[in-house]
Image (tube, helix red, strand yellow):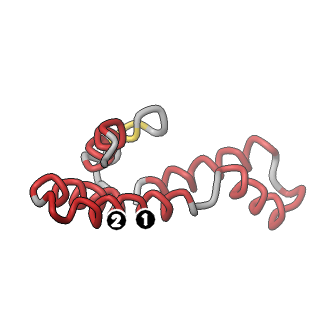
Amino acid sequence: MVDPLIVERLRQDAHGMHPGLFGHSHFASPLCRIETLAYTVGQKAPAVLAEASEILALVTAAKSAAPSRDEIAEAIEDVCGDELSGSCVNRIADAVMKLYRGR
């Protein structure tokens, strides 16, 4: 069964909204679109609800496999060493996360 809270989050993502992150994005990510389509298919064709739910679970797993902001910051620090200040590393990590989530 599909969780209604997940559905609402998917609808927000599909419209390019990332509440609490970086404001509005003008493009929904392909994974968000896949989630929305899987939900729609599951609602229109109850016979494939199990498969639609599996697609939703796989997309969620793919999204959670992404690097975290802290992992990105650590990678930047590893490459740049002491050449960048901590605040600069944080701003770069924030920018990378914004780009990553917007896709």
Q: In which quarter of the image is residue 66?
A: bottom right
Query: What's the residue at 30%, 41% (across, down)?
Result: 12
Give the position of the C terminus as an image quadrant. bottom left
Residue designated by label 1: 58
Q: Which amino acid does label 2 sit on?
A: Ile
Residue designated by label 2: 55
Using the image, determine if residue 58 lies above or below residue 20. below
Secondary element type, mark 2: helix
Tell whether label 1 touches label 2 (CB within 8 Å): yes
Using the image, determine if residue 38 lies above or below residue 43. below
Query: Would you say 28 lies left or right of 71 here?
Result: left
Q: In which quarter of the image is residue 35?
A: bottom left
Secondary element type, mark 1: helix
Q: Distance between the residues labelled 2 and 1?
A: 5 Å
Q: Position of residue 86 (x, y in %)?
A: 80, 44
Label drawn at residue 96: none
Q: How crowded is mark 1: few (under 14 residues within 10 Å), some or many (20 or more)?
A: some
